[in-house]
Image (cartoon, grey):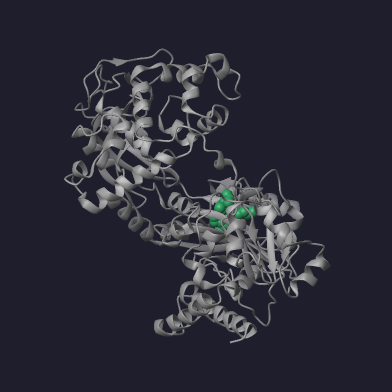
């Protein structure tokens, strides 16, 4: 086949497959059989294998993920992604309606009411119908470039469907919420539990964690979906109402929540809110309220925005879920820093669809303030689907069998006397050999943002410490296959995998190691600051308090904590053994390099002589840049190879910087 023909066929296949993806995933109404679909996919895969240089970045074959990134690029939103003002009562909603009507000098006003999805806001950019970039909301002004990850979400079209009546805009920035279904979340957590990986607290966190993967192949395996509900810049088309815009979205193949409704007035909005509240728990995804939007775009423009939210929209939040239960017991947990925390054990109860068995009571002061006794009947609440809290005690239910709780004077785990440090609310066990602390320290050391040791889950750490195989974090590096295989839920394969991930962790960046050591008051952020200034652990052994205090963000408390950590003989020995095991103790020079091309967009035309298109793309992306597939104003550089195509002319018209392959090689070297 001639190149032109291959290209044409590829484009045809992509268009067709994308249409069937839309029928299957977005509409849930396929029009061809799985076998027919597979045939189309196979033909495309074969063509791409034979002509890799012609493969399109937006090919559906890319939905399984792309090569991992080193860092995410930064994307500046051309129009800031605002947040919403919240209302918690009907009164506030009525006030909103009155305010808006007053500002517009109208007597009646139409709204669109939408479920408020509990996920993550993203922006998708389509140029002439092609998906070219996707980003997180971030701080509203800039977000992270998660294009590769978003490409793996089947309900995100890679090509918009053209409709004869509604032309596809030359530029369309669509906003929406990526979320995980409840079922998908449960399945994912079950799998993670089996693998000993930390669990996600709720579907929202799971969606966020999945979208922020540098390896999009991981994202591809997660049950993520999107609902679109807004726009940034739109070029080439205007809408008169929000509803009309949503209708256009649907025609283009963008997924829109079927529950969204036009309401003639605020009373209809409120009635719909109560309906949503009723069906909330039966929905396959979590929602935390309703978003009310003025339907007329003209009115929206007239109303404009205040500080960080539009005047034309309001989030009407659902009340937190509350339930009544009794406190069977109050136990004391010991964390990695030795802090003792009282935890209430409840008669299990379902709150908003989730079974709740326990909740932290924080400390003795809290218990006294809320006047909580063992045996009390209490109201508990899960606000925003997070950690449950005891809201209050129903004192009328007391019958004399209730008992006061007192924090123990000895550690419930190791029996050492508990110390109350002046100025601190929490009592501590200061025996650093306390098994509870050891377990906590080891879990922290291996956690995702620390040394990231995959497979080192809670139950494994329990066993390792209880069986005295591990007494400190350095022991992890001296574990053997023979020691691991006999452990519960282990087996040869998992044991080998664990040893491999322990081995891999030896090369983590210095900032992760510092954080992993668990120095008090030194979290992720400070670890990074410390690693930037003192480029090795050895330097931290000799650092003085004055030097530390000269560093922005390091105060006296942190400084003295760092000094005493590195003075401590036990810690010295642990670090010596980590070194002996081959754990990297220095800042590796390469670490700072990526992101040289951060935020820059490249486009290629013609053949490169030193590498293929996809290699060039990989290089650009590894350095934080991105590659577009068509000419647009956003492109920073057009790289021209042999026999360039029509892109060159267009780029010149738009004033895009044109460079040759030699210059390009210099930029990426
Ligand atoms: S509209 C200017 N519509 O809520 C309007 N937001 O508090 C901005 N959200 O960041 C957003 N469902 O993550 C809108 N149907 C919906 C939504 C929704 C969920 C989230 C979104 C946004 C946050 C604002």
Q: In the rendered view, tell whether residue 640 sits above or below residue 434.
A: below
Count of number-bearing discs? 0
Could you say which quadrant of the image residue 619 lies in?
bottom right
Q: Quadrant of the N terminus?
A: bottom right
Relative placement, left or right, of 346 versus 541 is left
From where the camera sits, is residue 380 visible? yes
Classify the position of ligand 1 by quadrant: top left, top right, bottom left or bottom right. Answer: bottom right
Q: Where residue 419 sits: x, y (%)?
A: 32, 15
Can residue 197 be seen from the camera position used here?
no
Residue drawn at point x = 48 percent, y = 51 percent = 208
Q: x%, y% of residue 316? A: 55, 51
Q: Which residue is at the front of the view, 382 or 35?
A: 35
Looking at the image, residue 158 lies above or below residue 33: above
Of the pair 660 and 479, the residue shown nearer to us: 660
Q: Along the line of sight, which residue is nearer the eye, 345 or 199?
A: 199
In depth, the one of 52 and 216 nearer the eye is 52
x, y percent for residue 542: 49, 18
Image quadrant of residue 161? bottom right
Q: In this rendering, is residue 237 above or below 331?
A: below
Farthest left residue in view: 486
Residue 386: x and y in percent read 41, 44
């Amino acid at each position: 086949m001639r190149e032109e023909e291959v290209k044409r066929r590829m484009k045809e296949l992509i268009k067709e497959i994308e249409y069937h993806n839309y029928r299957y995933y977005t509409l849930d109404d396929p029009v061809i059989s799985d076998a027919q679909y597979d045939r189309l996919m196979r033909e495309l895969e074969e063509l791409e294998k034979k002509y890799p240089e012609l493969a399109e970045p937006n090919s559906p074959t890319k939905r399984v993920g792309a090569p991992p990134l080193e860092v995410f690029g930064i994307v500046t939103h051309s129009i800031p992604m605002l947040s919403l003002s919240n209302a918690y009562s009907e009164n506030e909603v009525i006030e909103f309606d009155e305010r808006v009507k007053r500002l517009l000098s109208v007597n009646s006003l139409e709204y669109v009411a939408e479920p408020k999805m509990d996920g993550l806001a993203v922006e998708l950019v389509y140029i002439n119908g092609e998906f070219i970039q996707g980003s997180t909301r971030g701080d509203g002004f800039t977000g992270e470039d998660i294009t590769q990850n978003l490409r793996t979400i089947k309900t995100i079209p890679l090509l918009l469907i053209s409709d004869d009546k509604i032309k596809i805009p030359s530029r369309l920035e669509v906003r929406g919420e990526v979320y995980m279904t409840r079922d998908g979340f449960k399945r994912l957590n079950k799998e993670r539990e089996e693998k000993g990986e930390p669990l996600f607290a709720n579907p929202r966190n799971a969606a966020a964690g999945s979208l922020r993967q540098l390896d999009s192949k991981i994202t591809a395996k997660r049950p993520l979906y999107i609902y679109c509900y807004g726009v940034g810049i739109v070029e080439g088309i205007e809408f008169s109402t929000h509803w009309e815009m949503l209708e256009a979205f649907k025609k283009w193949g963008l997924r829109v929540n079927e529950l969204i409704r036009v309401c003639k007035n605020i009373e209809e909005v409120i009635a719909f809110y109560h309906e949503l509240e009723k069906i909330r728990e039966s929905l396959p995804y979590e929602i935390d309220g309703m978003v009310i939007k003025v339907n007329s775009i003209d009115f929206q423009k007239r109303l404009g925005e205040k500080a960080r939210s539009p005047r034309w929209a309001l989030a009407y939040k659902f009340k937190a879920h509350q339930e009544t239960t009794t406190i069977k017991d109050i136990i004391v947990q010991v964390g990695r820093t030795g802090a003792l925390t009282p935890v209430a054990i409840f008669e299990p109860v379902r709150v908003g669809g989730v079974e709740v068995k326990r909740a932290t009571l924080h400390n003795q002061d809290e218990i006294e303030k809320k006047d909580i006794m063992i045996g009390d009947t209490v109201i508990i609440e899960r606000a925003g689907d997070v950690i449950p809290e005891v809201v209050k005690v129903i004192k009328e239910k007391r019958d004399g069998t209730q008992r006061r709780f007192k924090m123990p004077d000895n550690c419930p785990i190791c029996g050492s006397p508990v110390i109350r440090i002046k100025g601190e609310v929490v009592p501590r066990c200061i025996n650093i050999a306390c098994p509870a602390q050891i377990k906590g320290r080891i879990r922290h050391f291996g956690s995702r943002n620390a040394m990231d040791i995959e497979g080192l889950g809670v139950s494994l750490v329990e066993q390792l410490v209880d069986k005295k195989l591990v007494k400190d974090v350095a022991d992890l590096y001296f574990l053997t296959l023979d020691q691991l295989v006999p452990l519960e839920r282990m087996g040869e394969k998992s044991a080998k995998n664990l040893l491999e991930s322990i081995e891999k962790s030896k090369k983590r960046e210095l900032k992760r190691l510092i954080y992993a050591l668990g120095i008090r008051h030194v979290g992720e952020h400070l670890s990074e600051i410390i690693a930037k200034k003192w480029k090795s652990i050895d330097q931290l052994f000799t650092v003085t308090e004055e030097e530390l205090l000269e560093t922005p963000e390091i105060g006296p408390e942190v400084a003295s904590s760092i000094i005493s950590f590195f003075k401590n003989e036990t810690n010295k020995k642990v670090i010596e053994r980590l070194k002996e095991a081959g754990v990297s103790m220095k800042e590796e020079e390469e670490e700072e390099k990526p992101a040289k091309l951060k935020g820059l967009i490249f486009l290629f035309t013609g053949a490169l002589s030193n590498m293929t298109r996809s290699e060039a793309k990989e290089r650009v992306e590894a350095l934080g840049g991105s590659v577009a597939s068509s000419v647009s104003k956003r492109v920073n550089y057009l790289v021209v190879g042999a026999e360039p195509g029509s892109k060159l002319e267009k780029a010149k018209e738009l004033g895009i910087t044109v460079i040759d392959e030699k210059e390009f090689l210099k930029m990426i070297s």
